[in-house]
Image (tube, grey):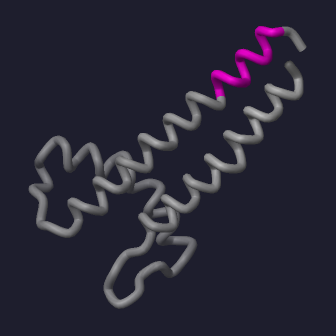
Amino acid sequence: MSILGVNFLTAVAYVLSKALSIYMWIIIARALISWVTPDPYNPIVRFLVSVTEPVLYFIRRKLPVYLGGMDFSPVIAILVIYFLQIFLVRSLMELALRIG
C-alpha cells in the first residue's frame, strides 16, 4: 500500500480518537448537569441532550441500568468509548504501521 494509504489510516485513527474523546466529555457534561435542575430551554443544555440522548436511550433500552434511582447509562457509554479507543483506534494505528 502506498504512503497515502498509510497516512490515511493514521489520520482516520487520530480523528476517530479525538472525536471519541470529545463525545466522552459531552457525556460527562450531560451527566453533571443532570445533578441540578437545568433550564431545558438553555441552548447548551438542549445541545447536550440532543447529542447524547440517542446513545443513552439506546443503552437504557437494551440494558436495565437504573440502580437505586440512578441512571448508569453514561458510565456504560464511557466504558464503550474507552473500549473503542483501545480496540478500534489502536488496531487502525497498528494496521497503518504494519502496512507502512
Which sits in the foreground, 60 or 15? 15
**Residue 70, image x and y in percent?**
34, 80
* Horizontal arrangement in the rendering, residue 49 relative to residue 86 (left or right): left
**Residue 89, image x and y in percent?**
67, 40
Q: Quadrant of residue 69?
A: bottom left
Magenta range: 3-12
Indicate whether 9 appears above or below 32.
above
Residue occupying image coordinates x 43% and y 50%: 24
* Horizontal arrangement in the rendering, residue 64 relative to residue 67 (left or right): right
Predominant secondary structure in magenta?
helix
Residue occupying image coordinates x 73% and y 24%: 9
Which sits in the foreground, 54 or 80? 80
Residue at the extreme bottom: 68
Residue occupying image coordinates x 51% and y 42%: 20
Q: Quick check: is 10 in the magenta stretch?
A: yes
Indicate whether 95 appears above or below 26.
above
For the C terminus, give its image quadrant: top right
Residue occupying image coordinates x 29% and y 48%: 48
